């Protein structure tokens, strides 16, 4: 999900929701499963969580996301009047207020205290660079690799629409930053040199602590990747390395080739590849383009069997296709955004149940928590994630037990896998 949401509306939301202090969203559980749900929920709520996708930090931190979308329409879950804003405030701050926790826990101890309050053991920090406000013992860094796809003039891409016009300058800026970090003063001489540079970017980030590389490529183009031969890409690199505006087709051919190089190298380096794989924000995000069936030929390509793929946001609204793709031994799903603020727990219960009934060992928990403004921070959205996931998972599993599909001990194994073990195993 993308992070340019309407800040003012959210600030108002906390106040409005405070008038409904007792209410919070919940899944509706089949009557035959209601007692089981009541038994499961406290046990599931005690499981320490591994959050597979979040953007921790404070509002205004430009190192969180290179492609913030201009303000646009938001899902209902994130709009004013939702009783969950008040529930989040109660759970996080109690009666003492937000400032108190911060003064009790200065520096990097603050975000650790937030995780402790919510029962989160470890959180991924998907950021351009890591922050000194985040303790590396609790936050694992996942960086953005997309800028390696943009070494040429991006003005042709920026001209497509206002979202792309907002995204492209940052991609160009980060491509320059990658070059500086690699000690390059000019573009690599040829395609072989450029691929060597891309490998160095991956290795440098891994050396500096990154545990995975993230593509938010669906914000820039579709998941349709051709497989161009190297000798068709070399002349494109030679023609545009020092200037000139490539055609859309030339840029796509180059990106298709470099994307595949990144996948190969991430396999060699044991660096999982995270891919934004759901509907996204902005007026010009292509739902057709992000359809996971477009990416299926890449995910099922035997050349990338040693590459670990994490489909961030679980492909939603193509979540039904996603779970069958996640039956590939090197593909996992992450439920962030989809399960935390695109859906309420009631609908998310049904998604989780379908996923659990097919391949529970490949489903992982994430929040996509990110800071919006001074009143709605990463903290509140961390709560949205854990609240949805615990209640929806307990409801889904209770209904599976009531339907005599699984036993209660099996349900708790699935819950531990989803909330912690399945993701944690990828980073040991
Ligand atoms: Zn995200």
Image: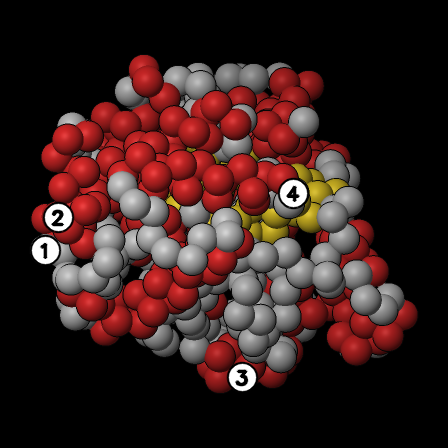
Q: Which of disc 2 and disc 4 is earlier in sequence?
A: 4
Q: Is residue 83 above or below residue 212?
A: below
Label 1 – label 3 distance at C-alpha: 45 Å
The residue lying at 79 percent from left, 78 percent from top is 99
**Where in the figure is residue 220, as x and y percent of width and height?**
27, 55
Label 2 – label 1 distance at C-alpha: 5 Å
The residue lying at 76 percent from left, 75 percent from top is 98
Q: Is residue 341 above or below residue 333?
A: below
- Give the number of the disc on residue 250: 2
Q: Is residue 383 left or right of residue 277?
A: right
Camera sees residue 358: no
The residue lying at 63 percent from left, 18 percent from top is 410
Quarter in which the C terminus is drawn: top right
Q: Could you classify mark 3 by the number of other residues whose Cα lies within 10 Å: few (under 14), some (14-19), or many (20 or more)?
A: some
Kindly state the secondary structure of the residue where label 1 is placed: loop
Q: Is residue 411 above or below residue 54?
A: above
The residue that disc 3 covers is 12
Kindly state the secondary structure of the residue where label 2 is placed: helix
**Where in the figure is residue 373, as x and y percent of width and height?**
57, 77
Q: Could you classify mark 4 by the number of other residues whose Cα lies within 10 Å: few (under 14), some (14-19), or many (20 or more)?
A: some
Label 2 – label 3 distance at C-alpha: 46 Å
Q: Point out the frontmost of discs 2 and 3.
A: 2
The residue that disc 1 covers is 247
Q: Which of disc 3 and disc 1 is earlier in sequence?
A: 3
**Numbered disc total:** 4
The residue that disc 4 covers is 209
Q: Nearer the viewer, residue 108 or 236?
A: 236
Q: Nearer the viewer, residue 232 or 335?
A: 232
């Amino acid at each position: 999900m993308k992070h340019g949401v309407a800040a003012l509306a959210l600030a108002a939301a906390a106040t409005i929701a405070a008038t409904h202090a007792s209410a919070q969203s919940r899944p509706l559980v089949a009557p035959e499963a209601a007692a089981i749900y009541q038994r499961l929920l406290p046990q599931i709520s005690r499981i320490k969580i591994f959050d597979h996708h979040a953007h921790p930090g404070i509002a205004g931190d430009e190192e969180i996301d290179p492609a913030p979308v201009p303000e646009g329409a938001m899902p209902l879950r994130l709009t004013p009047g939702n009783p969950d804003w008040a529930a989040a405030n109660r759970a996080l701050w109690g009666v003492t207020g937000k400032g108190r926790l911060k003064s009790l826990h200065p520096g990097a101890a603050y975000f650790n205290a937030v995780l402790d309050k919510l029962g989160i053991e470890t959180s991924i920090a998907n950021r351009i660079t890591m922050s000194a406000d985040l303790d590396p013992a609790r936050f694992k860094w996942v960086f953005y690799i997309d800028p390696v796809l943009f070494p040429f003039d991006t003005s042709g891409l920026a001209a497509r629409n206002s979202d792309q016009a907002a995204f492209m300058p940052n991609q160009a800026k980060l491509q320059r930053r990658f070059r500086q970090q690699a000690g390059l003063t000019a573009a690599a001489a040829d395609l072989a040199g450029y691929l060597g540079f891309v490998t160095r970017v991956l290795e440098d980030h891994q050396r500096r602590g990154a545990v995975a590389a993230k593509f938010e490529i669906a914000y820039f183009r579709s998941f349709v990747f051709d497989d161009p031969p190297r000798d068709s890409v070399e002349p494109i690199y030679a023609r545009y390395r020092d200037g000139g505006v490539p055609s859309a087709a030339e840029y796509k051919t180059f990106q298709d080739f470099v994307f595949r190089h990144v996948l190969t190298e991430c396999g060699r380096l044991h660096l999982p590849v995270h891919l934004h794989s759901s509907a996204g924000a902005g007026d010009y995000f292509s739902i057709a383009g992000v359809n996971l069936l477009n990416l299926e030929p890449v995910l099922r390509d035997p050349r990338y069997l040693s590459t670990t793929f994490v489909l961030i946001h679980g492909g939603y609204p193509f979540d039904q296709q996603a779970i069958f793709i996640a039956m590939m031994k090197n593909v996992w799903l992450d439920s962030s955004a989809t399960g935390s603020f695109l859906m309420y727990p009631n609908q998310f219960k049904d998604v989780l149940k379908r996923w659990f009934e097919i391949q529970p060992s490949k489903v992982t928990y994430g929040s996509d928590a990110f800071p919006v403004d001074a009143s709605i921070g990463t903290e509140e959205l961390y709560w949205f994630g854990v609240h949805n996931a615990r209640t929806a998972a307990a409801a889904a599993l209770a209904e599976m037990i009531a339907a005599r599909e699984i036993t209660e001990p099996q349900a708790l194994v699935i819950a531990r896998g989803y909330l912690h073990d399945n993701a944690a195993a990828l980073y040991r």
